[in-house]
Image: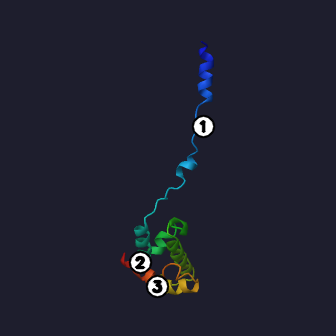
Amino acid sequence: MDLTNLNKDRKNKRKPSLDMSTMLYGKVPPQAKELEEAVLGAIMLEKSAFDNVVEILKPECFYVDAHQRIFKSFQSLAQKSLPIDILTVVEEMKLREELEIVGGPYAITKLPIQ
C-alpha cells in the first residue's frame, strides 16, 4: 500500500475554507436604541452637548434610520446657528419633510425623557 498517495487524496478532499462574509450574513449589527435616544435627548436638553459630540458622532453612527435623520437635522440647525431644542428640531424636520418619517412630533418630544 502506497501511503504517499493516501495523503494526497486526503488533501484534495478537504472542505474549502469558510468565507467570513457568509458567517456574518443574516446577523443583526450592534445596536443600542435606548442609548441613541438618550444621546439625542441630551443634545436637545444641554446647549453645549452638540458641540461636544459633533466631532465624534456622525449620522452613520446611529443604527435607527429615524435617529440618523434627527441627527442630520441637528447638524442643519447648528450650521444655521439656531438652538437645538424640541421646537426647532420639530420645525426643521417639517422643513425637511421628514417629521412623519421619524414618528411625528411625539417621537421628538419623548427623546429627552428617555
Whole-Å distance between the Cαs marked 1 and 3?
A: 53 Å
- Tell me where residue 85 appears, x and y as whole percent: 45, 83
Task: Give the SS element for disc 1.
Answer: loop
Task: Give the SS element for disc 2.
Answer: helix
Whole-Å distance between the Cαs marked 2 and 3?
A: 10 Å
Query: Quick check: marks 2 and 3 in contact, CB under 8 Å?
Result: no
Counting other residues with Cα less than 10 Å from the Cα at mark 2, is it few (<14), some (14-19), or many (20 or more)?
Answer: many
Q: Quadrant of the N terminus?
A: top right
User: In the image, which disc is placed on residue 16?
Assistant: 1
| Residue linked to disc 3 | 105
Q: Is residue 50 left or right of residue 14?
A: left
Q: Is residue 47 visible?
A: no
User: In the image, which disc is placed on residue 111?
Assistant: 2
Q: Quadrant of residue 5?
A: top right
Q: Residue at x 47, y 59 (%)?
A: 30
- Tell me where residue 105 appears, x and y as whole percent: 46, 85
Question: Three-letter amino acid code at disc 1?
Answer: Pro
Task: Give the SS element for disc 3.
Answer: helix
Whichever of labels 1 and 3 marks the residue nearer the N terminus, that label is: 1
Counting other residues with Cα less than 10 Å from the Cα at mark 1, is it few (<14), some (14-19), or many (20 or more)?
Answer: few
Front position in the image: 105 or 42: 105
Whole-Å distance between the Cαs marked 2 and 1?
A: 49 Å
- Tell me where residue 45 appears, x and y as whole percent: 40, 79
Q: Residue at x 54, y 83 (%)?
A: 93
Front position in the image: 17 or 111: 17
- Report the mark closest to the observer, 1 or 3: 1
Q: Residue at x 48, y 73 (%)?
A: 51
Q: Residue at x 52, y 84 (%)?
A: 82
Question: Three-letter amino acid code at disc 3?
Answer: Pro
Q: Is residue 13 left or right of residue 107?
A: right
Q: Quadrant of residue 4?
A: top right
